[in-house]
Image (tube, helix red, strand yellow):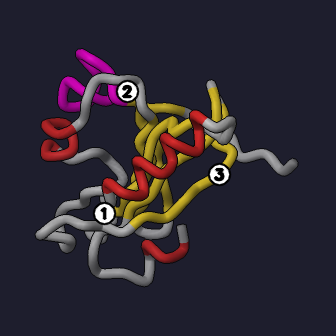
């Protein structure tokens, strides 16, 4: 996710894996009309990832995006646009990242609960 630090616009991508595990990160185009302050995953990339998962590839378990302002907490806009589907949201800001799960009645903005990230070498 080094490309987040090099961009003034929000960058985004998919988190691929399984229950409790992110196996791969796939960058996507941000197709938002306001990429400096918002993100929208490229729908074609998302559909391609879902199709790959149906053919035995890793599942889409969430996504990441950056906050060029450096804040690693989901914004109120993120909360309004997030489905309470249990997806993992990783937010990159100021060279660090934080993970969240989109849930109903979450602790932050009524939509997100924090998730602990543990990085392992395999």
What is the C-alpha distance between the residues marked 1 and 3?
21 Å
Mark 2 / mark 3, whichever is N-terminal: 3
Q: Give residue 31's quadrant in the image.
A: bottom left
CA–CA distance between discs 2 and 3?
22 Å
Identify the magenta region. 102-113
Look at the numbered disc 2 and give the secondary structure of its residue: strand
Residue pointed to by mark 1? 67
- Residue 55's spot in the image, x, y percent? 64, 38
Q: Which mark is residue 32?
A: none
Task: Give the main secondary structure, helix, strand or loop, of the magenta stretch.
Answer: strand
Q: Is residue 106 magenta?
A: yes
Q: CA distance from mark 2 to mark 1?
A: 18 Å
Residue neighbourhood size for the residue with mark 1, other residues' Cα within 10 Å, grouped as few (<14), some (14–19), many (≥20): many
Q: In percent of the image, x 66 and y 34: which residue is there?
A: 21
Q: Residue 61: horizontal and vertical position, in percent?
A: 51, 35
Going 40% across and 53% down the picture, which residue do you hit?
Answer: 91
Residue under pointer 2: 113
Please give left or right for residue 60 compared with residue 112 in the image.
Answer: right
Helix, strand or loop status at disc 3: strand
Provide the secondary structure element on which disc 1 rests. loop
Q: Which residue is mark 3?
A: 24
């Amino acid at each position: 996710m080094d490309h987040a630090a090099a961009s003034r616009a929000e960058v985004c991508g998919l988190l691929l894996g399984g229950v409790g595990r992110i196996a791969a990160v796939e960058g996507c185009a941000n197709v938002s009309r306001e990429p400096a302050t918002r993100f929208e995953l490229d729908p074609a990339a998302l559909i391609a990832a879902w199709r790959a998962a149906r053919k035995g590839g890793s599942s889409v378990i969430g996504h990441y995006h950056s906050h060029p302002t450096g804040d690693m907490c989901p914004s109120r806009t993120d909360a309004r646009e997030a489905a309470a589907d249990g997806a993992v949201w990783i937010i990159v800001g100021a060279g660090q990242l934080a993970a969240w799960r989109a849930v109903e009645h979450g602790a932050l903005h009524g939509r997100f609960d924090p998730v602990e990230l543990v990085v392992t070498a395999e």
